[in-house]
Image (spheres, rainbow, N blue to C red):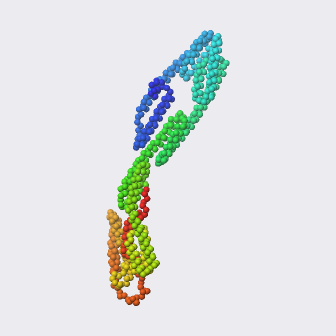
Amino acid sequence: MAAIVASGDAGSRAAQEQLKQAFYRLQREERAKAQAEFVANGGKAEEFTLEEDPLEEELKAQLVILKELRAKQIEDNEKKKETNLERKRAIIEEIKAISTSPEEANKAYDTFRKLQAEWKEIKPIPESAANEVWKQFQFAQDQFYDLLKTNSALRDYDFKKNLEAKTRLCEAAEQLINEPDVIRASHALQQLHQEFREIGPVAREVREDLWNRFKAASTAVNKRHAQYFEGLKEKEEENLAKKTAICEEIEAIELESINGYAQWDGLTKQIIALQEEWKTIGRATKKMNTKIFERFRAACDNFFTKKAEFFKDQKKAYADNAARKLALVEKAEALKESTQWTATTNELIQLQKEWKEIGATTHKTSNALWERFNAACNEFFDKKKAVLGDQHKEESENLIRKKTIIEKLEALAIEGGDNIAEAVRALQDEWAGIGHVPFKSKDKIYAKYREVVDKLYKEFNLRSPRRAPKGGNGGSGRPMPEGNSLLRLYEARKAELATYENNISFLTTNSKKGSALIDTMMKKIETLKANLADLAERIRQESEPKPAAEAPAPEETPAATEAPAEPVEATAAEEAAEKASATESAEKPAKESEEEPAKE
């Protein structure tokens, strides 16, 4: 723009308009980019403000100067056209002045030729008067030639030259009918018309035919020009429809429902493809071309602005998720040295559940955090396995040993023998000396053991050692029918008392209901303590040896009537060992006897 102003020539308005549109297109792109960067850096789109562009002010100043320069040039051109019009009218009057008689025409032939040459040199005149002045000039020439009698040779020579020139113009116009470039043909035809007017007259007999030939060729060229612009208008309407469809396709995208990188990536490729398609479509109608482009640009800008906002929000969400996962990593690393196997196992399992509930982070951060978290969990579980693995192994070995004892007892039940009582009691003592077995096998193996022992005592009429009299051979040695029942009842009441005493420690007296519950439990505890004291006394009495009655003579004692000893379920030592085993196994977390928690 500055170069055009410096030249002093306003130049083409269309060229200046193109420069102006290019400037504002670049400005819009720069501002859209600046807004996207502002949003990406944490700002809100509605808070973005445009800075003043100093180049825009300079452009406006140059446009004002060009406008003034163009106005002055137009004014000067109009004045020049008026001057040219006055001169052409003067030439017409001069030709009329020398066309008053044949004698004057013959004398002024050279002057007439000079006036014709001068007419050709004068170019621009007002458009509104051009046709009328040309007709007046043609009439004046014809009138002059009609009066030119004496110098007919010169007149015929001029007619011949003019005919040849106008014939060439007709031929050139006829060639333009087949010109591929319709616009170029139209411009060339206008130039031919200008030359046709400037050429002098031809003989009267060919004048009409020549003009009709030139007119017919001009009509054909003009018809093609009109058809071209009609087709161009239809094409522009089609282009407008295609561009409108592209705008509607972009505007129809539901940006609020997009919630993933894959969707944004796919839609971005779709938008870029539509932009490339837009470039292949020609201009729309002159009235709508700028408006449809602004609509297209606004739709694209809106898409990419929303995309920038989404990625900004995702970046913040990733940061929050990374912070939450880092907190879990630090907790896991703090627990990895713990030897509280049950409690720590539960805590780590809970941390793993929380980890799965937290959303994604960036790939690099996610891998680093996961490696730390997984390493901490693995370290704890590996140590736990190393420590508890030997215990599990020992319990499994104990289970095998007890199964072996059961097999030996079953063999005794089949084989029998004179020393079966000593063999059974030796195996019972061996059973009592074996440690714990896996918790899930404890009840089953103990039930099998009791079953085979009871069978032996019943089938072979064995007596329990703990029911034998303490001194001499006196006493009947019969088992006490309710001894085992009292012991089991005593142990049950004792366990129930321990449960109540443990539970009461968790209650508070902050409410009436809490106080009433505590009172009820205290009464229950007192009742259980009284029951235990009574049971202990009964057990003590049952354990004291009764005075032995005088035994009858051997021959008087019928062997067939001796009652067999009741099968003894287990010795006191065995029951105590099994209860201790059950208590210790109950304190172990059930999780330890199962597989370790799955690691994430």
Q: Could you tell me which residue is drawn at 50 percent across and 35 percent down?
A: 290
For this view, does 274 lie left or right of residue 378? right
Q: Is residue 442 visible?
A: no
Is 51 in front, or is 562?
562
Which residue, as the protein is rendered here, is positioned at the far right? 205
- In the displayed structure, 134 sits above or below 578; it is above
Residue drawn at point x = 41 percent, y = 32 percent: 54
Q: Is residue 54 visible?
A: yes
Name which residue lies at 38% across and 58% down.
380
Rendered view: 186 above or below 96: below
Q: How many marks?
A: 0
State which quarter of the image contains the C terminus. Answer: bottom left
Q: Nearer the viewer, residue 280 or 134?
A: 280
Q: Is residue 180 left or right of residue 302?
A: right
Q: Is residue 458 left or right of residue 113?
A: left
* Spot occupied by residue 138 in the image (x, y as percentages of width and height): 60, 18
Judged left or right of residue 303, residue 481 is left
Q: Residue at x 42, y 81 (%)?
A: 418
For residue 114, above or below residue 364: above
Residue 585 percent across, percent down from the top left: 39, 67
Q: Nearer the viewer, residue 360 or 402?
A: 402
Q: Quadrant of residue 571?
A: bottom left
Give coordinates of residue 404: x percent, y percent.
43, 72
Nearer to the camera, 277 or 376: 376
| Image location (x, y in percent) of residue 243 | 53, 39
